[in-house]
Image (cartoon, coloured by chain):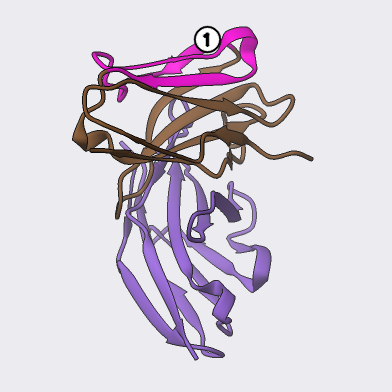
Amino acid sequence: EAGVAQSPRYKIIEKRQSVAFWCNPISGHATLYWYQQILGQGPKLLIQFQNNGVVDDSQLPKDRFSAERLKGVDSTLKIQPAKLEDSAVYLCASSLVSYQETQYFGPGTRLLVL
Amino acid sequence: AQSVTQLDSHVSVSEGTPVLLRCNYSSSYSPSLFWYVQHPNKGLQLLLKYTSAATLVKGINGFEAEFKKSETSFHLTKPSAHMSDAAEYFCVVSDTSGTYKYIFGTGTRLKVLA
């Protein structure tokens, strides 16, 4: 079974530039999550999708971050414009359904904002 | 609101000796609890999960954890550490009151000495 795929693996940009990350979840998984993991901290949920609808985006900085999950499959997370404090690893995860189900994580995208 | 506290940010053990990584949780509901491991530049991998079945949970690679409601603890143990166990470990509580989103601890970095 293929795991959660993410690209790119690494990205370096300058502040005020824009960047986009892509995630393809495990086939058949209805729920998709984007997390931000700052160095030395645990991952923090940014947004949760159930199929192509948003379940929770309470911690997404909506002035600069956006995410979409077209057709309920793969997803894109965008930052525009980026700030220095956005430097982090962005993790995508998926699960069959949300409640009590194991989340399976992708390898992450490491973003460095200069 | 749910929360989780990992009591040690760093733990060092000698190869072949027992491992204990401590986790305390706070939850108003019957929690689901998880331990994940993160090797450098890799995604998070599930070690084990507790979802109100047996209180002693066995996971992969010889790890196990015991759910103790009276102590609100979910400590991770392994009888004998291996060099390959060196990694970051995260304790996670699932918010069973609503969206079932994961709430991560701050992580414990395990170092295994030869």
Which part of the image, by quadrant, shows the N terminus of chain B?
Answer: top left
- Quadrant in the rendering for residue A18: top left
| Residue projecting furthest to the right | A1
List the residue tagged with mark 1: A53
Quick one: which chain is brown?
A
Residue A107 rendering spot, x and y as whole percentages: 55, 45
**Residue A110: image location, x then y, percent:** 41, 42
Front-most of B2 and A104? A104
Residue B22 seen in render = no
Colour of chain B as rendered: purple
Residue in the picture at 35% in, 59% down: B24
- Residue B58 spot, x, y in % from top left: 65, 65
Count residues near mark 1 (Cα–Cα under 10 Å), then give few for <14, some for 14-19, many for 20+: some
Q: Does the stretch in magenta take in A64?
A: yes
In the rendered image, residue A7, in percent from the top left (x then y), is placed at: 54, 33
Q: Is residue A57 left or right of residue B30?
A: left
